[in-house]
Image (spheres, rainbow, N blue to C red):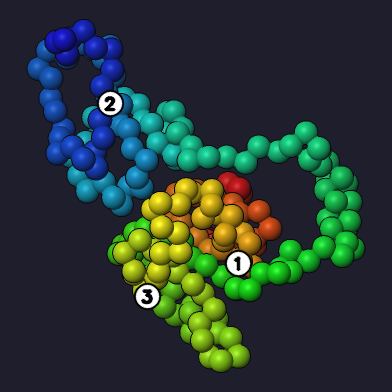
Amino acid sequence: MPHSQFDAFLVHPPTINGPYILKDRRPDQMFVLFSTEPPVHMYHLQKYENYFNWTISYRTGSTFQLKYGEIIPLESAPQTEEELATLRLSAAQSAVNPAKGKTKLAIWMVTNCKARSNRQGYVRALRKHLTNEKNQTSLDIFSRDGCEGGRIICSREKNGQECYDSIERDYKSSWAAPITRPWPRLIPSSTPWTSRRENWPTI
């Protein structure tokens, strides 16, 4: 089918060495940037200046936001500040201990071990302060390629839910180091923490 019959073109800058110029492009044809990667992973963006009409990405300022996920409150969730305060007070006064039965302090789940943000350096420094009585690090790292001494706690044969269940069962907290992306996934009864406070309004 000739390109003249298309109304829009999706362009994925991380994998396409563009831009492509259509000599007979119709004025109403849209060029759309499509990517779930942060800008730092799109190395040729400067070539696309004034090129796109629309954008599709995880960022809130996109023409069409493509979310990694979102948290949807239950119907029973507090609707007012007063209801929220009551819920917090009730939780504080309850005898529930979210850390009960958990044997490990924290885990960091990572796929990109050579991030430009140098979050791996941050983790190296952090691990020095997270030690147990035997002076052993209390921050485990789950990585597929062994970065920073990480290990695979879930084999490829296990499904994702089983991995998350094991993390929720054993770890008191989980850590993410998002720089431009939103929080990947929250683990119930495990305290999440991040190095950038501006991420919290998004969760």
As shown in the figure, which amino acid type bears the numbered disc 2? Leu
Dot label at residue 171: 1
Which of marks 1 and 2 precedes in the sequence?
2
Is residue 177 visible to the viewer in this orientation of the structure?
no
Real-space Cα separation, disc 2 to disc 3, in angstroms: 39 Å
Which of marks 3 and 2 precedes in the sequence?
2
Dot label at residue 10: 2
Query: Hey, which quadrant is residue 90 in on the image?
Result: bottom right
Q: Residues within 10 Å of mark 3 (few under 14, many from 20)?
A: few
Whether residue 137 is situated above or below residue 178 in the rendered picture: below
Residue name at image x 78 percent, y 40 percent = 77
Q: Secondary structure at mark 3?
A: helix
Q: Residue furthest bottom?
A: 134
Viewer-nearest of labels 2 and 3? Answer: 3
Is residue 175 visible to the viewer in this orientation of the structure?
yes
Q: Nearer the viewer, residue 168 or 178?
A: 168
Q: Circle 3 sits on which residue? A: 149
As shown in the figure, which amino acid type bears the numbered disc 3? Gly
Percent position (x, y) of residue 175? 53, 63
Q: Secondary structure at mark 2?
A: strand
Q: Do the residues under discs 2 and 3 have CB atoms within 8 angstroms?
A: no
